[in-house]
Image (spheres, helix red, strand yellow):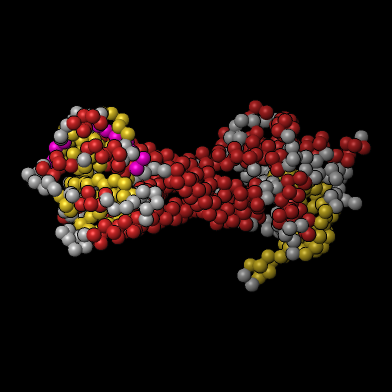
Amino acid sequence: MSLIEIRGVTKQFHKGAEVITPLDSADLDIERGEFVSLMGASGTGKSTLLNLIAGIDRATAGSIVVAGIDITRLSRTKLAPWRAANIGYVFQTHNLIPVLTAYENIELPLLLLPMRRSERRRRVEIALQAVDLVDRANHYPRQLSGGQEQRVGIARAIVADPTIVVADEPTGDLDPQTSQQILDLIRRLNAELGTTLLMVTHDQDAAAIAGRQLRLEEGKLVEVCRTMPSAVKSEAV
Amino acid sequence: MFNFLPYLLKTLWRHRTRTLLTVAGSAVAVFVYCFVVSVQHGLEQLTRQDDRVLVVFQANKFCPSTSHLPQDYALAISRIEGVTNVVPIQVFTNNCRASLDVVVFYGTEADKVQSARDFELVTGSWDVFQSQQDAAIIGQTLATRRNKEVGDKFSVGDVTVTVAGIFTSDKRAEEDYVYCHLDFLQRTRGLNIVGTVTQHEVFISESADPQQIADAIDARYQGGPVATDTRTKGVFQASSLTDLVQLVELSRYLGYACLALMAVLLSTTTLMSVEDRHQEHAVLQAIGVSMHRVFRLILCETVLLSVMGGVIGITVATLVLYTSGISVGAEAVSIAFVPSADMIITGSIASLVIGLLSGLIPAQHAARADIVSALRQG
C-alpha cells in the first residue's frame, strides 16, 4: 500500500456561471521516501492538488488516503491536528511569522504536539543544523535574507518529522543561486532523512532533481520521468 | 494555550502603537465608568444610611436657608417614646444649588457632636472645639481640598471659623462638612436667629418604628406654630438631592455607554488587526493550528487589551478619587465620589466581559477564513 493514494480526485471551482475543473478524476500513488515533482502551466491546478494532499482544501470528489487515513472524510476540526502530525508545508513566499524568531518559527509546529520543552529544543536545534542556520536562530525574519527565510521555512516543515513534506514553488521567489542552494537542501533532506516530498514547480531544472516527475495536463496527472526514489536508492545501497 | 503566549505578546508588542491606543481608549472608558460607579456608591451610602435617625424639617420647605424651626422642639420631641437623643442643627451653605464645591456649616451644640457622629479627630482637640466659641472641626476631605490645617481661619461668605480639629468619618460625605457651635452660627452673619434652627436630628432606639415616630412628630406640630416634615435621614437626603439623584441615575447610562464604546473600539481595532494578519492566521492553520485555537488566540488578544485598559482605568480612577476628594452637593447635602471594592470588582468584571464579547466577531472572522484564499492573498 502506498503512503499516499489519490483516487478519482476532482476539484471544481465556480467562477460566476463558469465551472473550472483543474483536477478531473486524478489518480496518484506516492511511496514512502519518494520525491515527486509536479509541473504544469500556471493555473493548471498544481497547487490545488498540493493543498488537497495537505488537507487545507477540499476535493469535490474522490478520495485521498494518507498513511491509511482518508482525509477527505475528516472534518475541518479533525484535519488541523492531522496536519500538525503529518504535513510539513513549505510555502513559496516563506510565510514566516514576523513577530517570532527563526527558532520560534521552527518550534511552532511542535507546540501543537504533546512534547516536552527539552524535546522541542532538541528537535529545533537538529532542524537548525540541517538547514545550516544555527547562528541565525535568534534572528527575526526581517533580519534574514530570502534564502535564509526559505531555509527556516524548510526547517519548520521538517521539524515535526511529518509523514510528507509538500513544497509549493519553494524557489519561486529566489534568485538562481539561492534557488540552487534550496534545491540542494531539499534533495539532501530526501536522500539523507528519507523525507517523502511532493514539490510543485514550473521550473524544469528544479523538477529534474526529483525521483519522479509528473505533469498536470487538463486535470490529469501524466508521468514524465521516473527514477528510483533517492531514499529507497540509499537503502538499497 | 500558554505555549502561544509569547506569540500573543509579541504580536501586541509589534503593533504597539495600536495596542497603546486601544489600551488607552479602554482605560479612559473604564475610568469614566469607575467615576460613575463611585458617584452611585456615594449616593447609595448617603441614602441608605441612618434609618435610626430622623430629620425634622419645616414643612413645605426644601432649602436649608428657608427652614426655621423653633429650637425648643428638641425638648418636646425628646419626650416621645423611642427617641434617645435630639440634636438641633443650624445649617449654612455657600451654595444651595448643585455644585462641585459646596461648603456646608452644621451648627450644633458642641457637646453633642461627639455622641451624634462617628468622627475621629486626626489632628486637633475636642476640648478646644468645645471651649472656643468660633471653633470648628472640619472633615479631612474638605481640609485637603481647601488646604486647611488646625489653627487656620476658614471663611465662607460672612462666616469665619477657626479650625480646631480635622476629622475622618466612615461616611465619606460627612468629610465635606464643617461642624461649629450652634449659637455661633445663629448669631453670625449679622443675623440673630437664636431660638430657631434649620432642622432637628432625632435618634431613635433600635426597637422604635421610625415611621411611627415621624408621624407622631408631624402630628404634634401639624397645627403650628411651625408645621414639620419628618423623614429618615436617608430619605431626607435623597429628597434634598432630587435633581442630582436623577442626574446620577442618568449617569449610570453614561457609564454603560462608555463600556459599549470600549467594546466597539476593541472590536474594531482587533478586526482591523485580524484583517492585516489574514495570511498569518492561514499559515498557522496550514501548519496545524486548529480554527478553535486561532479563535481563542484572538479572544485572548482582546481580553488582554481590555484587561490592561481596565487595570489602568481602575487604578487611575482609584488614585484620583482618593486624592482629589471630589464631591457634588446641593441643598447642603453632599454626595462624595467614593472609590469602593464594588467599583474595583465591577470594573474588572466589565473589562473581562467586554474583552470576551468584543473579541467574538474578530475571532470568528480569523478562525473561519478560508485557508487557501488567505494564502493566495499573500
Query: Where in the figure is residue B9, as x and y percent of width and height?
Result: 55, 39
Secondary structure mostly seen in the magenta stretch = strand
The residue drawn where x is 61% and y is 51% is: B295
Q: Residue furthest bottom?
A: A17
**Number of numbered discs present?**
0
User: Which quadrant: the C terminus of chain A?
Assistant: top right
Q: Nearer the viewer, residue A155 or B209?
A: B209
The residue drawn where x is 54% and y is 51% is: B356
The residue drawn where x is 35% and y is 38% is: B322
Query: Where in the figure is residue A32, as x and y percent of width and height?
Result: 85, 45
Q: Residue furthest right?
A: A236
Q: Nearer the viewer, residue B261 or B377?
A: B261
Is B75 situated above or below A153? below
Relative to B310, A143 lies left or right: right
Query: Where in the figure is residue A210, as x and y percent of width and height?
Result: 80, 44
Q: Nearer the viewer, residue B135 or B372?
A: B135
Magenta stretch containing residue B263, yes or no? no
Q: Nearer the viewer, residue B39 or A30?
A: B39
The residue drawn where x is 88% and y is 51% is: A2
Magenta region, residue range: B157-171
